[in-house]
Amino acid sequence: MAVKSKKTIQRIPGSAIERSLRVFGFGIKTGISAIAKTRTAIQQAEALAKMMGEMKGSMMKAGQLLGLVGEHFFPKEVNAILRTLNAQSDPVAWPVIEKALVRRLGRERMAKLVIDEDPWAAASLGQVHRANVLATDQKICIKIQYPGVAKAIEGDLRNLRVILKFMGALPIKIDDGPIFAEVRTMLRREVDYVQEKESTREYSALVAGDPRFLVPEVIDEYSGPRILATTWIDSVEIEDVAVKSMTESRRKALAQSFLELFLAEFFSWNLVQTDPHFGNYRVRLGSGDEPDRLVLLDFGAVRRFPPSFVRRYAQMVRAALDGDEAAMAAAGKDIGILPRNASASMTRIFVELCNLVIEPFNHGVYDWGKSDLPQRATRMGVKLVVDERLPSPPRELLFLDRKLGGVFIFLSHLGARIDGRPLLEKAISACLQAEEVSP
């Protein structure tokens, strides 16, 4: 697979001044349009998304993250446009990438490789090119960070926050500080390829020996702070026709593997890959006795969760599975979702939301592909935030919710029909039992 877009970005605004001026210019145009009433709110949001996409870097990535966690905070029109940023983005032209490669690898190491000038994948912070090692003919992938994106994080977030408020995209009186703080944390992690290299190796060790999963190997010789090389694994996209045409039993096996992986990530390892879009998961098709295997990619968005948070969350899930409303409310307060002085109506809606989220695990074999659960849960969450004025949730919850949404979409896409309760029961029981025996 190569990037399908025919459009390439010839230049990324690099300096803080240039990026700020681009945003300032957008703000002036937006303000003039608003005064003249020549643009609708949706058109303004579309223009914002276009500007973010052209600027790349943390401006675009922040928009993606906000689109994934902002369903309770932004107007639905703005959030829908922000979500479009998660689609495959236009790649940066090869001369720009080549210059970055020369600077980061040096010509001597580059001479050892034959690099495909057409990108295999393009994203907000960098893009991936395939290559062959001349001496061994080994196929590898090289992930190159776009120039200047790491230095632009603070300025981009500051500018984005200003422009969203200027557009009236934050009409709800909430404290958006924790949201932007978490986005800042994740951005800093995602531009740190040394950290991603170690996370890749850690995940590889965690799934080692499990025939359902594959993680590429890191190649140190061609890696660095802003470049990451890994082995190439032949595989297909989740949306490939070969996956869509699988038998129900094969799709069910993939879906169950994905669900079990998430439960292990959160409840056992306390280490979650919180960027669950389809581009980070592929399938190595099985043949004969060899099973289909999930290929796990991109560990820049790894989040470690405090064991105390995970245990409290497990207690909340346990209460929801048991239908114990008082315990649900108590757990919600312990974890910091519900305020201690929550009103009766706020508590009631919170309990209803808990029951919604646990729905796939309380109805035997659940048909994920035919469920409208995300829409119902979103409406309930909006009621909590808007009608009941629920305070901003704990930072940890923002990106856990992002992962949960990704799990649902993944299983829905595969048309999974699974009884997930035994898997969830096993995971939370192990988590809570570990708490009891810990010193």
Image (cartoon, helix red, strand yellow):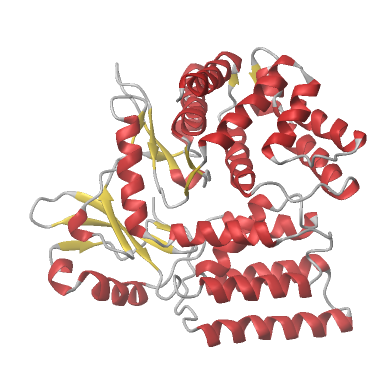
Residue 394: x and y in percent read 66, 47
Q: Find residue 220 and report its image quarter.
A: bottom left
Quadrant housing the C terminus: top left
Judging depth in this view, the residue of 320 and 406 nearest the camera is 320
Residue 41: x and y in percent read 82, 67
The residue positioned 45% from the left and 58% from the top of the image is 190
The residue positioned 34% from the left and 72% from the top of the image is 97
Judging depth in this view, the residue of 277 and 104 nearest the camera is 104
Judging depth in this view, the residue of 87 and 202 nearest the camera is 202
In the rendered image, the vertical position of residue 94 relative to residue 345, given as above or below: below
Q: Of all residues shown, which one is farthest toward the left?
A: 135
In the rendered image, the vertical position of residue 354 relative to residue 3, given as above or below: above
Is 200 placed left or right of 8 in the picture? Answer: left
The residue positioned 67% from the left and 86% from the top of the image is 25
Q: Of all residues shown, which one is farthest toward the front?
A: 439
In the rendered image, the vertical position of residue 108 relative to residue 239, given as above or below: below
- Asked whether residue 50 is in view, the answer is yes
Residue 223: x and y in percent read 25, 59
In the rendered image, the vertical position of residue 303 relative to residue 266, given as above or below: below
- Asked whether residue 410 is in view, the answer is no
The image shows a total of numbered marks equal to: 0
Q: Find residue 292 and report its image quarter.
A: top left
Is 308 placed left or right of 132 in the picture? Answer: right
Residue 432: x and y in percent read 55, 21
Is 100 placed left or right of 191 in the picture? Answer: left
Is 75 placed left or right of 266 in the picture? Answer: right
